[in-house]
Image: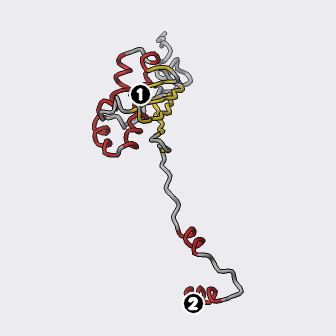
């Protein structure tokens, strides 16, 4: 019955007829948006990483291997060699240390939280660059978001779990 109604409406000369371009745009599905990463022309990839209270936004572009954190070189922003190695681990694993430039915007948290968030953001960006990196990065644990956060202080206690001194008498 719906087909007969559609045929009758299509044959009615008093109604405006849709153009072929309008029909094509009505039936075309909307492009799917990616949840975590944004791509743009020139190979730019943007991702976000979080750990504790730190939030890091990363832009990765083809380049010489420079890592810039809030406008400063990696060695200046993270003087600790442990943090530097932690951040570079995903790039070393995928052998992209000298091929990509990393520009990071870090906010909140401390140095360890920011370093962990930066490592997660770089690993996510590498997956957007090449999905074949996912198994190796997953096996190394670089894609797991560390969900541990500071436990809140409870009333009646001095800290989250520390109770005031108890006196028996």
Q: Is 147 displayed left or right of 31 in the figure? A: left
Is the residue marked by circle 1 packed among few (<14), some (14-19), or many (20+) residues within 10 Å? Answer: many
Q: Which residue is mark 2?
A: 4
Q: Residue 70: x, y in percent?
A: 52, 24
Which of label 1 and label 2 is nearer to you? 2
At x 39% / y 28%, what residue is drawn? 64
Q: CA distance from mark 1 to mark 2?
A: 63 Å
Q: Determine the secondary structure under disc 2.
A: helix
Q: Residue 162: x, y in percent?
A: 47, 18
Choose top left, top right, bottom left or bottom right for residue 26.
Answer: bottom right
Q: Determine the secondary structure under disc 1.
A: helix
Is 35 rendered above or below residue 144?
below
Q: How many numbered markers are drawn?
A: 2
Q: Which residue is mark 1?
A: 116
At x 52% / y 66%, what residue is drawn? 28
Q: Mark 1 or mark 2: which comes first in sequence?
A: 2
Q: Nearer the viewer, residue 121 or 22?
A: 22
Q: What coloring was used for the rendering?
A: secondary structure
Q: Dots 1 and 2: beta carbons under 8 Å?
A: no
Q: Nearer the viewer, residue 15 or 135?
A: 15
At x 48% / y 35%, what residue is drawn? 59
Q: Residue 133: x, y in percent?
A: 31, 41
Q: Nearer the viewer, residue 30 or 20?
A: 20
Q: Is 104 displayed left or right of 133 in the figure? A: right
Is 15 rendered above or below residue 93?
below
At x 44% / y 35%, what residue is drawn? 60
Q: Is 130 displayed left or right of 160 in the figure? A: left
Position of the N terminus, as image quadrant, is bottom right
Is the residue marked by circle 2 packed among few (<14), some (14-19), or many (20+) residues within 10 Å? Answer: few
Q: Residue 143: x, y in percent?
A: 36, 37
Residue 143, label in figure? none
């Amino acid at each position: 019955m719906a087909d007969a109604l559609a045929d009758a409406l299509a044959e009615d000369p008093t109604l405006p007829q849709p153009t072929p371009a309008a029909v094509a745009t009505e039936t075309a599905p909307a492009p799917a948006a990616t949840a975590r990463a944004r791509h743009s022309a020139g190979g730019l990839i943007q991702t976000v990483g979080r750990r504790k209270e730190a939030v890091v936004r990363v832009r990765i572009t083809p380049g010489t291997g420079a890592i810039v954190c809030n406008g400063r070189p990696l060695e200046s922003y993270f003087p600790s060699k442990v943090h530097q190695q932690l951040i570079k681990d995903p790039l070393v694993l995928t052998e992209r240390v000298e091929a990509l430039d990393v520009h990071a915007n870090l906010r909140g948290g401390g140095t360890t939280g920011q370093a962990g968030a930066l490592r997660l953001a770089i690993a996510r960006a590498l997956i957007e660059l090449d999905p074949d990196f996912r198994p190796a990065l997953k096996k190394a644990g670089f894609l797991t978001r560390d969900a541990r956060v500071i436990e809140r202080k409870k009333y009646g206690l001095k800290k989250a779990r520390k109770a005031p001194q108890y006196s028996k008498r």
